[in-house]
Image (cartoon, rainbow, N blue to C red):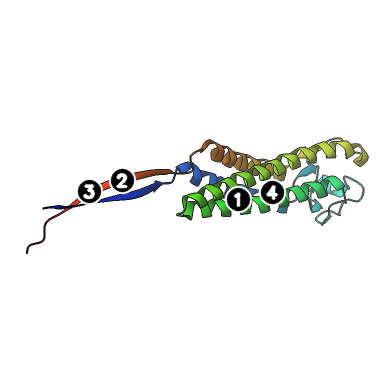
Amino acid sequence: MVAQTTTIETVTVIRPLKITALLCLIISLGLMIAALSTNNWLRTGSYHTGLFNECTDSGGLDSLVKPINGSPLPGQCQKTKDYAYVKAVISLLIISCIVILFASISNILGLKSDDHHRKYLYHKVATGLTFLAVLCDILSLIIFPACFYNIMSMLQIRHWELDYSYAIAWGAFSFAFTALLLKICDKEHEEVYYKEKTVYNPPELA
């Protein structure tokens, strides 16, 4: 009599949305670090300021006159003035960077885990952390121009431009928000297929 053996194989398929969300988080983290480390959030003439330093460009007619009181000499930089809203923006963006880092790690652990319950937990944690990062980003991007507008009259200069560092921060927010949407849309954390295979073993010869 032919012996029959049935085996069931479990095949887990990772959706591309998870990989795309992870890439968006990594790009967002890199852009936010760039926005924090550059000194071009605001500009007027030869003067430009970031969150940590303010600088005056050297060369050109604009650099011969200090654009605002207390600004650095042409070709030099100094610490940004001690404004409470700047400290708040820095704190929010640093929190966002830390949260995005942990969200990325949680996402990677979810992709690598073989346990379905842990996969679900890791992806839930990553989604929650990404939401927190997006919230911190949008708050900082609203607070910065709104609060600066209130003190602009004190600086005696009306013409100001939001510079490329602020645009980079918006780019970081856009990628983080995209990652959040991808994780929310991906309701099923993985697709599991069960493949049944029947093997017929020939009888052993006596």
Percent across and percent down for residue 204 are 11, 61
Label 4: element kind = helix
Q: Amino acid at mark 4?
A: Ser
Identity of the residue drawn at 60% across and 42% down: 175
Residue 33 visible within the image: no
Q: Is residue 51 left or right of residue 133?
A: right
Q: Nearer the viewer, residue 202 or 164?
A: 202
* Amino acid type indicated by mark 1: Ala
Q: CA distance from mark 2 to mark 4?
A: 43 Å
Residue behind mark 2 = 195
Residue under circle 3?
Answer: 198
Residue bearing mark 4: 96
Are discs 3 and 4 less than 8 Å apart at CB?
no
The x, y position of residue 201, in whole percent, is 16, 55
Q: Nearer the viewer, residue 136 or 44?
A: 136
Q: Nearer the viewer, mark 3 or mark 2?
A: 3
Residue at 84%, 56% in the rendered image = 79
Looking at the rendered image, the disc whose residue lies closer to the viewer, 1 or 4, is 1
Q: Check whether the beta carbons of the residues at disc 2 and disc 4 lie within 8 A of each other.
A: no
Please tell me whether mark 3 or mark 1 is closer to you in this view.
3
Rendered view: 142 above or below 121: above
Q: Amino acid at mark 3?
A: Thr
117 above or below 156? below
Q: CA distance from mark 1 to mark 2?
A: 33 Å
- How many marks on residues? 4
Instruction: Check disc 1 and report the residue beneath it.
Output: 103
Which badge, 3 or 1, comes first in the chain's sequence?
A: 1
